[in-house]
Image: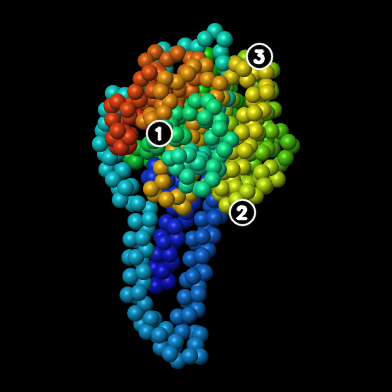
Amino acid sequence: MPYVVIFLGFMLFSSANWVVRKFGPVTYEQIMFHLNMPFHSEIRLILSYLQNTVMTGTIVVLVLWLLFSGKYRLKWSSIERIRTKIYEYRWVICLIWFVFCVAYYCWRMNVWAMITYRSYKREMSNFYEQYYVLPQNAEVSFPHKKRNLILIFMESMEATFAQTPEHNYYQDDLIPQLHKLAQENISFSDSQYLGGEFPIDGTQWTQAGLFAKTCGAPIQLPIREVNLIRPKGEFYPNAWCLYDILRTQGYEESFLIGSNGNFAGMNHFVKTHGKQRFLDTLHYAREQGIKLSYKQKSKSIADKELFVQAKEELNHLAELGKPFVFTIMTLDTHFGSQEFSGDVCGYKYGTEKNFKNVVSCSDFQIGQFVEWLKQQPFYANSTVVLLGDHQMMRGEFETDMKRRTLNIFINSAVQAVTEKNRVFTPFDIYPSVIESMGGKISGHRLGLGTSLFANLPTLTESKMTVDEMNIEVRKSSKIYDWLLYGKEIK
């Protein structure tokens, strides 16, 4: 029985370390969202967890059992006496160990913040009633000659990686190509230099970042109906997103991702909003005539292959003669170490596993892809938007670092009135993308977002602070339940 207590304590200790090392600081809704997603799309992540917790814990307990079972005597009497004494007080030691592990888990996982989050969910808020603009009721118009949209979500891409007078965290500019594109085009910032938006609860992981920046709302999970989180059918059926608006305007839509479409319910989101042509690893395998095993279905496509597909798909869309929106989601920088294409970039920063190599290589490949776009006939009538989906999930970042995700608007149809020293959130990207294409929005607001191209303050510049918005989005809301479940508002 003492060995069970030791094992359970070790599981708490190692689980907390593994989560923070892999994901960095996590939130309650982030954990619950991914626990309710299909696991087979993240087999490598599951194996990593089992290896670092269950397997290691089993080995530790087995070694302790061999030392203290009494079946194996040691030659040195002094060590034998120590072993006997430890065995005599084994229950006290086990109890101290378990209490320490519980306390460590609560500190490392910031359990107090999660308890606070649940207390907010018991409050009913009128936040959405006051500030949420239903996009389906908004007046949105486009010019007669509609512009194409090429939307590139860059996995975990932060402005933090650049070298500026404001910050130089890595003694080098890890993203010189993107930094240059930001300087030559439009890049909204919270400072005078390269920066980005303030993160809001419910926007800090891949699917949440995509949803916030194309639908203008966070992903928040009503605890009282946790069994309904998993999107078996439609994903936020009443939300009216960027892709829904563009579909009604006659746009051809295509969505390319380098992972299995089941990851984070991505396939459900794409099918629900815009009914887009969805290209994931399974589609790639079918196109190439490759039969994948169950384990292989969880593997991702390196960005160097993804951009080859992107070029083919863009040429296909251009041939259709209709305005199109094409979305790409890169993956190499997932956790900062998903994939490193040494044959493309070379080892600039020491070993292959150094995340700086991965970030630098992603910067190079995205820069090359943008240069290719500029040479294409359809570029002149296209707006290209580069967006970091969320901050990088790694436990090694200093807590005092000023971290912002990157945004760059290239070949925009309009100019920004105020580009720097803005206080904005991921929600403000949604209407900004539409206006960058030449679209006109009555009031310049959609969802919780305000277009950054308009001469208007955002919600966090005029109505509330970022901290106040973080509190409000955690609370329960009838309108939010309607967006999430399609429930009737009473």
Q: Are marks 1 and 3 in contact (CB under 8 Å)?
A: no
Q: Which quarter of the image is occupied by the N terminus?
A: bottom left
**Residue 25 at x, y = what percent?**
41, 48
> What residue is shown with label 1?
191
Q: State the separation of the CA atoms marked 1 and 2.
A: 32 Å
Residue type, mark 2 in image: Gly
Q: Which image quadrant for residue 475?
A: top left
Q: Secondary structure at mark 2?
A: loop
Q: Earlier in the sequence, mark 1 or mark 2?
A: 1
The mark found on residue 321 in the picture is: 3
Q: State the separation of the CA atoms marked 2 and 3.
A: 47 Å
Q: Earlier in the sequence, mark 2 or mark 3?
A: 3
Local crowd size for mark 2, using a 10 Å CA cut-off: few (<14), some (14–19), many (≥20): few
What residue do we see at 65% from left, 49% from top?
Answer: 347
Q: Which image quadrant for residue 343?
A: top right
Q: Nearer the viewer, residue 324 or 68?
A: 324
- The answer to whether residue 340 shows anywhere in this view is yes
**Residue 272 at x, y = what percent?**
50, 26
Is residue 318 left or right of 121 when viewed as pictured? right
**Residue 278 at x, y = what percent?**
60, 29
**Residue 296 at x, y = what percent?**
65, 46
Q: Earlier in the sequence, mark 1 or mark 3?
A: 1
Q: Of tags 1 and 3, which is closer to the observer?
A: 1
> What residue is shown with label 2?
350
Residue type, mark 3 in image: Gly
